[in-house]
Image: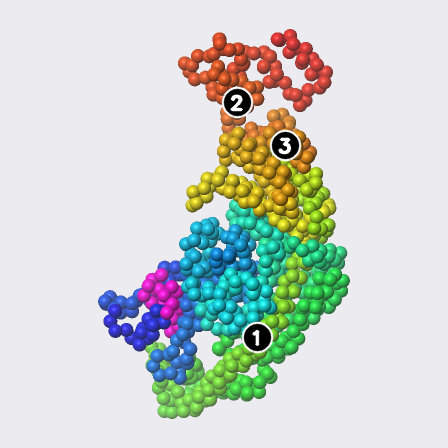
Amino acid sequence: MATPTPMMRQYLEIKSQYPDSILFFRLGDFYEMFLDDAVTAAKVLDITLTSRNKGSVDEIPLCGIPYHSAPPYIAKLVEQGHKVAVCEQVEDPKEVKGIVRREVVRIVTPGMVMENDLLTPDENNYLLVVSRSNAGFGVAILDISTGEFRVTQGQNVADVRREISSVNPREILVNELDKEWLIGELDGFIQNRSLNTLPEWVYEYEDAQRRLIRFFKADSLDSFGCQNQPDAVCAAGAALYYIEETQKSTVEHIRTLRTYHVSDYMVLDDATRRNLELTATLVDGKRQGSLLGALDKTVTAMGGRKLRHWINHPLLDCQTIAERHSLVAELVQAPLLREDLRENLDGVYDLERLTARISMASANAKDLVALNLSLERLPELLNQLDRLTSSLGQRLHHDIDPLQDVAELIGRSIADNPPFVIREGGLIRDGYLEELDELRLISREGKGWIARLEKTEREQTGITTLKVRYNRVFGYFIEVPRTQVAKIPESYERKQTLANSERYFTPQLKEYEDKILGAEDKLTTLEYEVFQTIRAQVSLHAARIQATAEALASLDVLVSFAMIAHERNYVLPVMDDGTLLHIEEGRHPVIECMNLSERFIANDVHLDTVSDQLLIITGPNMAGKSTFMRQVALITLMAQIGSLIPAKSGHIGVVDRIFTRVGASDNLARGQSTFMVEMSETAHILNHATPRSLIILDEIGRGTSTFDGVSIAWAVAEYLHDYDHVAAKTLFATHYHELTELSTTRDRIENFNIAVREWNDQIVFLRKIVPGGTSHSYGIQVGRLAGLPDEVINRAKEVLSNLEQGEFSCEGQPRLAKLQKGTSSCSDRQAQMSLFTATDDPLRQRLLTTDLDTITPIEALNLVDELKKLL
């Protein structure tokens, strides 16, 4: 490249500081991108790629977008995995000679997002930071769009996987030295997530500690509870470093660091979250069809995010669970109050994200209006909450600050319908500031004078098409059609010639132009300054607004729970710290809502560690085994997040972990077969389950030979029963009917099956769980329901009949194949029935044509007599 221009030299210098980001370089009303950034951006954004010095050796690729429409373009780049460095003009071009000073004001990454185009209202946008040492792992979780910042310390990489699974971060940060190791360990947990690194020194404990103390203006870390968790401190310090590097501004809405422990909540691994479809379906990853979709009747974005958090973090503390249950039950019994609360909550905007934008000085006047409209709802909400008697209801009432001073400030200062752009005026209410009112009067009078001037000039010149106009380049001017130029007076001075008209000005018009535009410039500048002052004043109350937002979000979820409980006939469960799990007439919370035309068949379950610890459940595919087991797990989880449950009654001892081993698929990336994946998940369960856990096992040992599979399934069941340190409540579905014999040797193992009725060689699934085992899988009937050809069904029946009758070949092997042409029969060496249908055997024919489902007792006796005669 030849010697660059001053502007290009400035661009290259700034770009060198952000080599891994696409630089949005502000030039007037556009963001321009140059060189490789332009090529990449043009392709991703589908915008025109052009160039400077086109055709020369100094050709510079470039593209650009209007600055006011940048958010969706930034969103698209970030979604494609790019960082975007936003470089603004930090000086007024009118007041500077030469090149305007420019600086990068923020870097947008997947986890550092404030733009609404990149945010989902009812989902958090988390950044997760991992710190690793010989002692364990630290995990920091941050949502800059809401101000949430929390940290924990784990002992092993499984804890890291669990945290990633629970919060679903958009971006993960790791020490650059740990990247390759963590990629190997977290395989499958970092897919579709941005993974970035930070230098090793950022994770040094002393630096991280000082950074945290300085940021929170604290004397020590004691008040945050992480002083004895060095890995957690390192992760939190790295998160703060990343904020400072990317945001380039104050982030005062991040007001505290909350330390939590993995043991504070029910443990749910990634497999369990997916198999239970807590927040997304297995098939298409959609919200509809998940537990979240079934339980979400929240009306605020904050409530939607809170519900998602509660589902991913079920409680273990009985008292806290009971407080939620009590408030929900109270709201179920108060329908008018419930509807009034919901109606008022529906008018509350996203206070958490509004507060974040206000604190970071990126909020516009409409954001302040939205805040004020939300605050206007609080007095009536507080009056309604005053009618609640439950302890949690009273605490929420206490935690909601009416914020009347903030509402009064915004209400008397900000216009009712201000523009989105905050530098073009129209922000401040009349009467708020006398100087603004005076400037507005001058502007309005001046515009009235312009209208009167146009009328006077038309009358004096006789040019009826004369107009007084304005544009930003030439200011005010008199425009006359060229056909009327002969009529203009000598006092007109030509300003511009166009194809069909001439433009003029007069000394009088110029004088008023200076007066009007001067007033309008002052007005716009002053309004912007006043707005900034008001926004800064509101930001001083960020902590109060955030505390109120937290309470409103919880209230929204609890009102949602009460609505659903009322509409779907949910009941209040009995909760305690015991190990009993008893549900009477339980229903699947999702499936019962999906097909309202068909009555859902309710089922009971009784599990404990004394008599009914492990239930062996047999029955055909499609009969409802998986639905039943998942419903037990979901009802348990619902109870522990504070929801009422879909059942006639329930007594649930708090469960510390839910494990699911349901289905499997090859993990080709790690070289693991379906069976290996299944065994790995089973090993994880056996190594981590406790007597307070709930285990769902759906088919163990299917990916290997029958004998191996039965052996492994048998041994797993025995292990769960025999070892006291495990002894977890378990639902074990299987097609290995041999496992039903376990109940004869193990006193806490019971057999159940899915009731099925046979009719005319067809099966009807009754969906009812009944005591006892079954020896029939009904696989052939299910195959018919699935649409297998009749030829396959008929042949399968022949083979099954042969196996059940124990028919063997001359060599002692089961005869499963038809005799091939030219193969001699061994009937002369060993008398046995052929595998083929013996059409010439009257006894066989008579039996096959008898319908045993419809035969009467007398007919049966006659049949026996007839068959005897055929022998």
Answer few, some or many: residues within 10 Å of disc 3's Cα (few below 14, many 20 plus, some between 14 and 19): some
Which residue occupies 71% across, 19% down? 856
Q: Which residue corresponds to mark 1? A: 539
Q: Nearer the viewer, mark 1 or mark 3?
A: 3
Residue contact at pointers 1 and 2, CB within 8 angstroms:
no
Residue 585 picture quarter: top right
Residue contact at pointers 2 and 3, CB within 8 angstroms:
no
Answer few, some or many: residues within 10 Å of disc 1's Cα (few below 14, many 20 plus, some between 14 and 19): many
Q: Real-space Cα distance between discs 1 and 3? A: 66 Å
Is residue 222 or residue 331 the one in the foreground?
222
In this view of the protein, can residue 77 be seen by the observer? no
Q: Which residue corresponds to mark 3? A: 742
Point out residue 129 in the picture as x, y percentages from the top left corner. 49, 60
Q: Is residue 264 above or below residue 455?
A: above
Residue contact at pointers 1 and 3, CB within 8 angstroms:
no
Indicate whether residue 19 is drawn in magenta: yes
Which residue occupies 74% across, 58% down? 330
Q: Which mark is residue 799?
A: 2
Query: Considering only order in the chain, which callout, 3 or 2, is on the residue closer to the N terminus?
Result: 3
| Range drawn in magenta | 17-40
Point out residue 758 in the picture as x, y percentages from the top left corner. 64, 28
Query: Considering only order in the chain, which callout, 3 or 1, is on the residue closer to the N terminus?
Result: 1
Which residue occupies 61% across, 18% down? 849
Give the structural element (helix, strand or loop) at label 1: helix
Which residue occupies 54% across, 45% down? 684
